[in-house]
Image: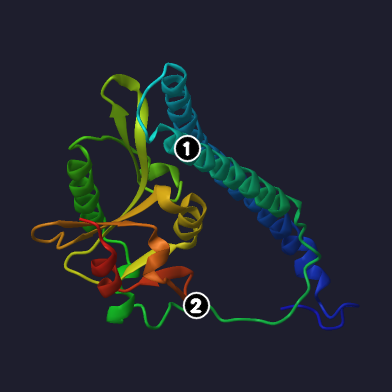
Amino acid sequence: MLDASHPRGGEDVPYASGLTDFLHEVSEERERQVATIARHLSLSLDELIMRENLRLMDLTDRQAQGDPDPMLPANIRSSAIRLEDLNHRLTTCQIELQKERSLTLGDIVHCGRAWMLTYPDRDRPEYSGMRRDDDVERTAVDAVIRHEEEGYAVESVELENRGFDLISRRFDPENPGVSVDVRFIEVKGRAGTGDVFLTENEYMTATRLKNDYWLYVVYNCASTPEVRLIRDQVRLRWKPVVTVEHYQAGKDAILRASEG
Protein backbone atom coordinates (compact mmCIF):
# COMPACT_ATOMS: atom_id res chain seq x y z
CA MET A 1 0.00 0.00 0.00
CA LEU A 2 1.39 3.40 -0.95
CA ASP A 3 1.60 6.11 1.65
CA ALA A 4 -0.91 8.78 0.63
CA SER A 5 0.93 11.32 2.76
CA HIS A 6 3.93 11.06 0.46
CA PRO A 7 4.68 14.44 -1.20
CA ARG A 8 3.60 13.04 -4.59
CA GLY A 9 0.72 10.99 -3.29
CA GLY A 10 2.85 7.87 -3.19
CA GLU A 11 3.78 7.99 -6.90
CA ASP A 12 7.52 8.38 -6.24
CA VAL A 13 7.70 4.94 -4.65
CA PRO A 14 6.86 2.83 -7.73
CA TYR A 15 8.58 5.36 -9.99
CA ALA A 16 11.86 5.05 -8.15
CA SER A 17 11.63 1.34 -7.41
CA GLY A 18 10.34 -0.09 -10.67
CA LEU A 19 8.91 2.20 -13.34
CA THR A 20 12.22 3.82 -14.24
CA ASP A 21 13.72 0.38 -14.83
CA PHE A 22 10.64 -0.54 -16.86
CA LEU A 23 11.16 2.56 -19.02
CA HIS A 24 14.70 1.45 -19.79
CA GLU A 25 13.49 -2.08 -20.60
CA VAL A 26 10.90 -0.73 -23.04
CA SER A 27 13.51 1.47 -24.74
CA GLU A 28 15.93 -1.44 -25.10
CA GLU A 29 13.19 -3.72 -26.43
CA ARG A 30 12.21 -1.13 -29.04
CA GLU A 31 15.83 -0.86 -30.18
CA ARG A 32 16.04 -4.66 -30.47
CA GLN A 33 12.82 -4.78 -32.49
CA VAL A 34 13.98 -2.06 -34.89
CA ALA A 35 17.36 -3.80 -35.31
CA THR A 36 15.61 -7.11 -36.07
CA ILE A 37 13.29 -5.51 -38.63
CA ALA A 38 16.21 -3.70 -40.26
CA ARG A 39 18.25 -6.91 -40.51
CA HIS A 40 15.42 -8.94 -42.00
CA LEU A 41 14.42 -6.13 -44.35
CA SER A 42 17.98 -5.89 -45.62
CA LEU A 43 18.22 -9.64 -46.15
CA SER A 44 14.95 -9.70 -48.10
CA LEU A 45 15.30 -6.62 -50.28
CA ASP A 46 19.05 -7.02 -50.83
CA GLU A 47 18.39 -10.43 -52.35
CA LEU A 48 15.72 -9.02 -54.65
CA ILE A 49 17.97 -6.13 -55.68
CA MET A 50 20.87 -8.49 -56.40
CA ARG A 51 18.63 -10.74 -58.49
CA GLU A 52 17.28 -7.81 -60.51
CA ASN A 53 20.79 -6.43 -61.02
CA LEU A 54 21.88 -9.77 -62.44
CA ARG A 55 18.84 -9.88 -64.71
CA LEU A 56 19.49 -6.35 -65.98
CA MET A 57 23.16 -7.16 -66.62
CA ASP A 58 22.17 -10.24 -68.60
CA LEU A 59 19.68 -8.27 -70.69
CA THR A 60 22.13 -5.46 -71.45
CA ASP A 61 24.85 -8.00 -72.34
CA ARG A 62 22.48 -9.64 -74.79
CA GLN A 63 21.68 -6.26 -76.32
CA ALA A 64 25.40 -5.41 -76.65
CA GLN A 65 26.00 -8.73 -78.40
CA GLY A 66 23.33 -7.93 -80.99
CA ASP A 67 20.52 -10.17 -79.75
CA PRO A 68 17.65 -9.64 -82.26
CA ASP A 69 14.88 -10.26 -79.70
CA PRO A 70 12.34 -7.43 -80.37
CA MET A 71 11.23 -7.52 -76.72
CA LEU A 72 14.74 -6.90 -75.39
CA PRO A 73 14.52 -3.06 -75.12
CA ALA A 74 11.17 -3.31 -73.33
CA ASN A 75 12.52 -5.95 -70.95
CA ILE A 76 15.54 -3.76 -70.17
CA ARG A 77 13.28 -0.79 -69.38
CA SER A 78 11.05 -2.99 -67.22
CA SER A 79 14.01 -4.39 -65.31
CA ALA A 80 15.49 -0.91 -64.76
CA ILE A 81 12.15 0.37 -63.42
CA ARG A 82 11.85 -2.68 -61.17
CA LEU A 83 15.37 -2.10 -59.84
CA GLU A 84 14.67 1.56 -59.19
CA ASP A 85 11.49 0.65 -57.31
CA LEU A 86 13.31 -1.90 -55.14
CA ASN A 87 16.05 0.57 -54.24
CA HIS A 88 13.43 3.22 -53.48
CA ARG A 89 11.57 0.79 -51.20
CA LEU A 90 14.79 -0.09 -49.38
CA THR A 91 15.72 3.56 -48.88
CA THR A 92 12.21 4.51 -47.74
CA CYS A 93 12.07 1.67 -45.23
CA GLN A 94 15.52 2.54 -43.89
CA ILE A 95 14.41 6.16 -43.36
CA GLU A 96 11.25 5.00 -41.56
CA LEU A 97 13.26 2.68 -39.33
CA GLN A 98 15.69 5.48 -38.52
CA LYS A 99 12.74 7.63 -37.47
CA GLU A 100 11.59 4.84 -35.17
CA ARG A 101 15.08 4.70 -33.66
CA SER A 102 14.91 8.44 -33.05
CA LEU A 103 11.70 8.24 -31.06
CA THR A 104 12.19 8.84 -27.37
CA LEU A 105 10.01 7.81 -24.48
CA GLY A 106 8.97 10.53 -22.08
CA ASP A 107 8.63 10.34 -18.32
CA ILE A 108 6.10 7.92 -16.94
CA VAL A 109 2.88 9.63 -15.91
CA HIS A 110 0.20 7.85 -13.90
CA CYS A 111 -3.01 7.85 -15.95
CA GLY A 112 -5.04 5.14 -14.28
CA ARG A 113 -5.26 1.50 -13.29
CA ALA A 114 -6.45 -1.59 -15.14
CA TRP A 115 -7.41 -5.08 -14.00
CA MET A 116 -5.98 -7.53 -16.55
CA LEU A 117 -8.20 -10.54 -17.27
CA THR A 118 -8.04 -13.36 -19.79
CA TYR A 119 -9.72 -12.26 -23.01
CA PRO A 120 -13.38 -13.24 -22.47
CA ASP A 121 -14.16 -14.01 -26.13
CA ARG A 122 -11.15 -16.27 -26.74
CA ASP A 123 -13.41 -19.30 -27.36
CA ARG A 124 -15.70 -17.59 -29.87
CA PRO A 125 -15.52 -19.27 -33.34
CA GLU A 126 -14.47 -16.08 -35.13
CA TYR A 127 -11.32 -15.88 -32.99
CA SER A 128 -10.40 -19.55 -33.10
CA GLY A 129 -7.93 -18.85 -35.92
CA MET A 130 -5.87 -16.71 -33.59
CA ARG A 131 -5.03 -19.68 -31.38
CA ARG A 132 -2.00 -21.48 -32.71
CA ASP A 133 -2.27 -25.24 -33.30
CA ASP A 134 1.26 -26.59 -33.69
CA ASP A 135 0.14 -29.81 -35.40
CA VAL A 136 -1.94 -27.94 -37.96
CA GLU A 137 0.83 -25.42 -38.59
CA ARG A 138 3.40 -28.20 -39.08
CA THR A 139 1.11 -29.97 -41.54
CA ALA A 140 0.57 -26.70 -43.41
CA VAL A 141 4.28 -25.88 -43.68
CA ASP A 142 5.11 -29.42 -44.83
CA ALA A 143 2.38 -29.21 -47.49
CA VAL A 144 3.76 -25.89 -48.77
CA ILE A 145 7.33 -27.23 -48.88
CA ARG A 146 6.15 -30.22 -50.93
CA HIS A 147 4.28 -27.85 -53.25
CA GLU A 148 7.28 -25.55 -53.71
CA GLU A 149 9.84 -28.29 -54.24
CA GLU A 150 8.37 -28.81 -57.70
CA GLY A 151 10.85 -26.40 -59.28
CA TYR A 152 11.92 -24.32 -56.29
CA ALA A 153 14.49 -24.65 -53.49
CA VAL A 154 12.93 -23.93 -50.11
CA GLU A 155 14.64 -22.47 -47.04
CA SER A 156 12.83 -22.39 -43.70
CA VAL A 157 13.19 -19.25 -41.58
CA GLU A 158 10.32 -20.09 -39.23
CA LEU A 159 12.38 -19.56 -36.09
CA GLU A 160 13.83 -16.19 -37.13
CA ASN A 161 10.73 -14.00 -36.66
CA ARG A 162 11.15 -12.37 -40.07
CA GLY A 163 7.43 -11.94 -40.75
CA PHE A 164 7.33 -14.94 -43.08
CA ASP A 165 8.10 -18.66 -42.75
CA LEU A 166 9.84 -19.73 -45.95
CA ILE A 167 12.06 -18.38 -48.72
CA SER A 168 11.44 -20.17 -52.00
CA ARG A 169 13.90 -19.71 -54.86
CA ARG A 170 13.83 -20.85 -58.47
CA PHE A 171 17.29 -20.91 -60.03
CA ASP A 172 18.36 -20.36 -63.61
CA PRO A 173 18.93 -23.87 -65.08
CA GLU A 174 21.85 -22.52 -67.12
CA ASN A 175 23.36 -20.69 -64.15
CA PRO A 176 22.44 -22.53 -60.93
CA GLY A 177 23.93 -19.81 -58.76
CA VAL A 178 21.45 -17.19 -59.97
CA SER A 179 17.88 -17.14 -58.69
CA VAL A 180 15.32 -15.99 -61.25
CA ASP A 181 12.40 -15.93 -58.83
CA VAL A 182 12.19 -15.45 -55.06
CA ARG A 183 9.10 -15.81 -52.91
CA PHE A 184 8.88 -14.81 -49.26
CA ILE A 185 6.13 -17.07 -48.00
CA GLU A 186 3.96 -16.80 -44.91
CA VAL A 187 2.10 -20.05 -44.21
CA LYS A 188 -1.27 -20.19 -42.47
CA GLY A 189 -2.94 -23.52 -41.79
CA ARG A 190 -6.49 -24.43 -40.80
CA ALA A 191 -7.79 -27.83 -39.76
CA GLY A 192 -10.77 -27.26 -42.07
CA THR A 193 -11.46 -23.84 -43.57
CA GLY A 194 -11.75 -20.50 -41.85
CA ASP A 195 -10.54 -16.95 -41.57
CA VAL A 196 -6.85 -16.14 -41.43
CA PHE A 197 -5.07 -13.73 -39.11
CA LEU A 198 -1.69 -12.02 -39.48
CA THR A 199 0.33 -10.65 -36.61
CA GLU A 200 1.40 -7.03 -36.84
CA ASN A 201 4.93 -8.13 -37.78
CA GLU A 202 3.63 -10.32 -40.61
CA TYR A 203 1.28 -7.63 -41.88
CA MET A 204 3.96 -4.92 -41.88
CA THR A 205 6.45 -7.26 -43.59
CA ALA A 206 3.87 -8.00 -46.29
CA THR A 207 3.34 -4.27 -46.77
CA ARG A 208 7.07 -3.68 -47.17
CA LEU A 209 7.73 -6.60 -49.53
CA LYS A 210 4.56 -6.09 -51.60
CA ASN A 211 4.38 -8.47 -54.60
CA ASP A 212 7.38 -10.46 -53.37
CA TYR A 213 5.43 -11.52 -50.27
CA TRP A 214 3.22 -14.57 -50.76
CA LEU A 215 0.53 -15.84 -48.42
CA TYR A 216 -0.01 -19.60 -48.66
CA VAL A 217 -3.18 -20.66 -46.89
CA VAL A 218 -3.49 -24.40 -46.33
CA TYR A 219 -7.05 -25.57 -45.72
CA ASN A 220 -8.16 -29.03 -44.57
CA CYS A 221 -4.93 -29.82 -42.70
CA ALA A 222 -6.85 -32.39 -40.65
CA SER A 223 -7.67 -34.42 -43.78
CA THR A 224 -6.24 -33.63 -47.22
CA PRO A 225 -4.28 -30.36 -47.21
CA GLU A 226 -5.25 -27.89 -49.93
CA VAL A 227 -2.74 -25.12 -50.66
CA ARG A 228 -4.06 -21.71 -51.71
CA LEU A 229 -1.53 -19.21 -53.13
CA ILE A 230 -2.12 -15.47 -52.74
CA ARG A 231 0.16 -12.78 -54.09
CA ASP A 232 -0.34 -9.11 -53.30
CA GLN A 233 -2.25 -9.90 -50.13
CA VAL A 234 -3.53 -6.31 -49.90
CA ARG A 235 -6.37 -7.53 -52.14
CA LEU A 236 -7.77 -9.41 -49.16
CA ARG A 237 -8.82 -6.12 -47.56
CA TRP A 238 -7.53 -7.03 -44.11
CA LYS A 239 -9.54 -5.78 -41.18
CA PRO A 240 -7.63 -4.88 -38.01
CA VAL A 241 -8.93 -6.79 -35.00
CA VAL A 242 -8.80 -4.06 -32.39
CA THR A 243 -9.41 -6.32 -29.40
CA VAL A 244 -6.09 -8.03 -30.07
CA GLU A 245 -3.22 -7.02 -32.34
CA HIS A 246 -3.88 -9.11 -35.45
CA TYR A 247 -5.29 -8.57 -38.95
CA GLN A 248 -8.08 -10.71 -40.39
CA ALA A 249 -8.98 -11.87 -43.90
CA GLY A 250 -12.16 -13.86 -44.61
CA LYS A 251 -12.09 -17.31 -46.18
CA ASP A 252 -14.22 -16.17 -49.14
CA ALA A 253 -11.66 -13.50 -50.03
CA ILE A 254 -8.88 -16.08 -49.77
CA LEU A 255 -10.66 -18.48 -52.13
CA ARG A 256 -11.32 -15.71 -54.66
CA ALA A 257 -7.78 -14.34 -54.58
CA SER A 258 -5.88 -17.64 -54.60
CA GLU A 259 -3.82 -18.48 -57.68
CA GLY A 260 -3.58 -22.24 -57.32
Q: Residues within 10 Å of mark 1 (few under 14, many from 20)?
A: some
Q: Secondary structure at mark 2?
A: loop
Q: Residues within 10 Å of mark 2 (few under 14, many from 20)?
A: few
Q: Which image quarter is the N terminus in?
A: bottom right
Is there a contact, CB below 8 Å, between mark 2 and mark 1?
no
Front residue of 19/155: it is: 155
Q: Between tags 2 and 1, which lies in front? A: 1
Measured Cα–Cα span from mark 2 to mark 1: 40 Å
- Residue that badge 2 annotates: 242
Q: Residue at x 56, y 46 (%)?
A: 37
**Residue 123 visible from this viewpoint:** no
- Furthest-right residue in view? 7
Q: Is residue 28 above or below residue 87?
A: below
Q: Which image quarter is the C terminus in?
A: bottom left
- Residue that badge 1 annotates: 79
State the count of labels: 2
Q: Residue at x 20, y 46 (%)?
A: 142
Disc 1 marks a residue whose amino acid type is: Ser
- Residue 180 position within the rendered picture, expressed as x and y whole percent measured from the top left: 35, 32
- Residue 137 position within the rendered picture, expressed as x and y whole percent measured from the top left: 25, 55
Front residue of 127/227: it is: 227
Q: Residue at x 52, y 37 (%)?
A: 80
Between disc 2 and disc 1, whose residue precedes? 1
Q: Secondary structure at mark 1?
A: helix
Q: Residue at x 42, y 64 (%)?
A: 234
